[in-house]
Amino acid sequence: AGMAALAGKEEASGGEAVALQPQAPTNASGARLSRLPLARVKALVKADPDEAIFILARTAELFVETIAKDAYCCAQQRKRKTLQRRDLDNAIEDVDEFAFLEGTLD
């Protein structure tokens, strides 16, 4: 079989193609970044795409709120009320859950 026919598949020892399971991205230490099984998430998205878009938008809002609060804490530690980019950089560096963002603002 050609490479195009095996896209998303891997050849088993017997020569037959088997579907690969999606792997959750990992951080530098190898820990999974997602606690949810990606196959289940994909199934939910397929079941109701409109609801999935709403949930994704709400999740993004909560993420921005969380990282902004952490960045504000960094500003408060330096006796400032105004957020600066370095506060966001510090929040990304200090919070393990934000490790995937390291280097994205450069």
Image: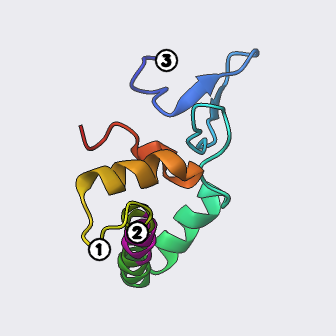
Q: Is residue 93 magenta?
A: no
Q: Is residue 66 magenta?
A: yes
What is the residue that sits farthest to the front in this orientation?
A: 79
> Which residue carries the number 1 mark?
81
What is the residue that sits farthest to the right in this orientation?
A: 14
Q: Nearer the viewer, residue 51 or 5?
A: 51
Q: Nearer the viewer, residue 28 or 83?
A: 83
Instruction: Count the marks.
Output: 3
Q: Amino acid at mark 2?
A: Gln
Q: What whole-number distance in Å separates the C-alpha atoms at marks 1 and 3?
A: 62 Å
Q: Earlier in the sequence, mark 1 or mark 2?
A: 2
Asked if residue 16 lies left or right of residue 4, the reply is: right
Q: Secondary structure at mark 3?
A: loop
Q: Residues within 10 Å of mark 1 (few under 14, many from 20)?
A: few
Read off the magenta span: 62-70
Residue 70 is situated, as x and y percent measured from the top left of the image, at 46, 66
| Mark drawn on residue 76 | 2
> Which residue carries the number 3 mark?
1
Of helix, strand and loop, which mostly describes the magenta segment?
Answer: helix
Q: Residues within 10 Å of mark 2 (few under 14, many from 20)?
A: some
Q: What whole-number distance in Å separates the C-alpha atoms at marks 2 and 3?
A: 61 Å
Mark 1 vs 3: CB contact within 8 A: no
Q: Nearer the viewer, residue 63 or 48?
A: 63
Quadrant where the C terminus lies? Answer: top left
Q: Amino acid at mark 3?
A: Ala
Residue 91 is situated, as x and y percent measured from the top left of the image, at 44, 55
22 vs 44: above or below: above
67 vs 53: above or below: above
| Mark drawn on residue 33 | none
Give the residue drawn at x 56%, y 30%. 9
Q: Nearer the viewer, residue 68 or 79?
A: 79
